[in-house]
């Protein structure tokens, strides 16, 4: 039995969790900073790192107490080293190093994208654990900072098949939400607004990029921008803080639900079709979704309707940033003896670690 304490501070959630054997969540603490950043319409990096400093120690204490754990119960400490915001990553990584050093525990460095993928090995506490995915699988990671398709032939063995050339899917949701006067984070706000909208109301562009499995969302975002560049809307927006809702009359003129639904449909269409092609090309036995945008209800439904192989999607709370996914990904690295040294540094632009083992 191996119990790993994971720490995640790559963006705006201070998270600590203890996971047993890579799959069973014993404790899971997520201190969200969303309310702090909402007034800025997005993550304010310096505020995020300062808040991590304040929250991290109580979060560790809470994660240990939730399951009545003491330090001898823990076999290793894992931390996200990147990708992410530098000031935020530094807090979690340094605290993890200090803990591992003082408790004489091994330290495991985890890539944030690999962590997101491992949400598919977990279940929410109290829920039954699903059978572990078989290999090879195609993974679609869609978060606020990343959008990529990867072939995973084993734990730690990835080959990137395609990625975004500009905005990440979640970033597009967040930016379009701002344009529509919706609150941060944009994904849940657009999903909510879209419930009352017609997804065929606006013909928005889909960047297919030929046969490529790469993505591009900036043209779609610009198309929405042109639709809202109406002088009345601009006048109403002038001088207002980004996250303040627009007056109801302006919201009606903008047809926010229809625009939100049409935008969401355009993103989902491209994500679903490219994932379908990737699964077919790689003869994947399953498809795994991961990252904050995988919480999107329309994406979850369409993926399951269209894909010819089973689609695994973590519970929404495990799609967004948390530390159970860090402790899970760390387990297989720990098993392989892949430990970090005391010289471990952050890598804000880290890519998914690709290795030759991937088919
Ligand atoms: O994975 P995550 O928590 O953080 C990063 O690693 O970036 O993802 C956050 C992103 C945000 O862009 C947020 O708008 C998006 O995930 N998101 C959603 C939904 N819930 C969160 N996007 C679409 N629909 C949702 N329901
Ligand atoms: Zn993330």
Image (tube, rainbow, N blue to C red):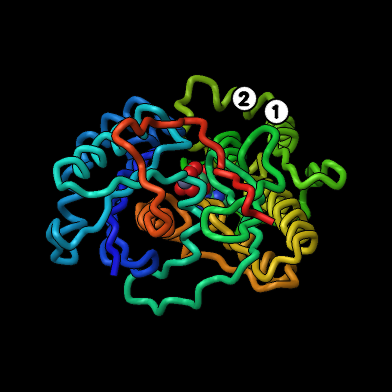
How many labels, in total? 2
The secondary element bearing badge 2 is classed as: helix
Q: Is residue 220 visible?
A: yes
Residue at horizontal 79%, vertical 58%? 277
Question: In the visual, does 31 lie left or right of 206?
Answer: left
Q: Quadrant of the N terminus?
A: bottom left
Give percent across and percent down for residue 276: 75, 61
Residue occupying the point 30% across, 38% down: 92
| Residue at the extreme right | 210
Q: What residue is pinned by disc 1? A: 230
The reply to whether dot 2 and dot 1 touch (C-beta < 8 Å) is: yes
Up-down: is 14 above or below 39?
Answer: below
The vertical placement of 265 against 254, above or below, is below
Instruction: Give how far across and how far down residue 70 sits, in percent.
Output: 12, 60
Q: Quadrant of residue 244?
A: top left
- Decide which of 218, 20 is in the foreground and name it: 20
Mark 2 Cα-neighbour bin, 10 Å: few <14, some 14–19, many ≥20:
few
Q: Position of residue 344 (x, y in %)?
A: 35, 33
Picture quadrant of residue 237: top right
Residue at image location 27% in from the left, 48% down from the top = 106
The location of residue 266, given as percent across then percent down, is 73, 49
User: What residue is rendered at 63% in x and 69% in y?
Assistant: 311
Q: Which residue is nearer to you in this view: 171 or 162? A: 162
Where disc 1 sits, the SS reads: loop
Residue 178 location, quadrant:
top right
User: Badge 2 is on which residue?
Assistant: 234
**Crowding near pointer 1: few (<14 within 10 Å), some, many (20+)?**
few
Question: Label 2, label 1: how many angstroms apart (C-alpha)?
Answer: 6 Å
Whether residue 7 sits left or right of residue 145 in the image: it is left
């Amino acid at each position: 039995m191996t119990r790993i304490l994971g720490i995640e501070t790559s963006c705006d959630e201070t998270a600590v969790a203890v996971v047993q054997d890579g799959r069973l969540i014993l404790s899971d603490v997520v201190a969200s900073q969303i309310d702090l950043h909402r007034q800025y319409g997005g993550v304010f990096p310096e505020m995020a790192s300062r808040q991590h400093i304040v929250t991290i120690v109580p979060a560790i204490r809470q994660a240990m107490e939730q399951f009545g754990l003491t330090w001898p119960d823990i076999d290793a400490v894992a931390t996200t080293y990147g990708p992410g915001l530098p000031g935020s990553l530094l807090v979690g990584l340094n605290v993890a190093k200090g803990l591992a050093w003082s408790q004489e525990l091994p330290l495991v460095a985890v890539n944030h994208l690999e962590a997101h993928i491992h949400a598919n090995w977990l279940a929410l506490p109290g829920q039954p654990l699903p059978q572990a995915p078989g290999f090879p699988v195609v993974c679609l990671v869609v978060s606020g900072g990343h959008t990529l398709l990867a072939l995973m032939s084993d734990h730690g063995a990835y080959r990137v098949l395609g990625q975004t050339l500009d905005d990440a899917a979640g970033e597009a949701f967040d930016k379009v939400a701002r344009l529509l006067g919706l609150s941060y984070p944009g994904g849940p706000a657009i999903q909510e607004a879209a419930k009352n909208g017609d997804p065929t109301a606006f013909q928005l562009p889909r960047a297919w990029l030929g046969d490529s499995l790469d993505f591009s969302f900036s043209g779609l975002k610009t198309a929405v921008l042109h639709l809202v560049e109406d002088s009345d809307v601009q006048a109403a927006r002038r001088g207002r803080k980004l996250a303040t809702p627009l007056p109801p009359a302006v919201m009606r003129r903008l047809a926010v639900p229809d625009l939100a639904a049409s935008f969401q449909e355009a993103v989902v269409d491209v994500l679903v079709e490219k994932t379908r092609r990737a699964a077919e090309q790689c003869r994947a036995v399953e498809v795994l979704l991961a990252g904050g945008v995988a919480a999107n209800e329309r994406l979850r439904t369409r993926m399951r309707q269209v894909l010819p192989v089973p689609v695994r999607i973590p519970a929404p709370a495990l799609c967004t940033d948390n530390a159970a996914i860090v402790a899970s990904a760390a387990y297989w690295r720990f098993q392989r003896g892949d430990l970090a040294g005391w010289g471990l540094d952050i890598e804000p632009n880290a890519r998914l670690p690709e290795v030759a083992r991937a088919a």
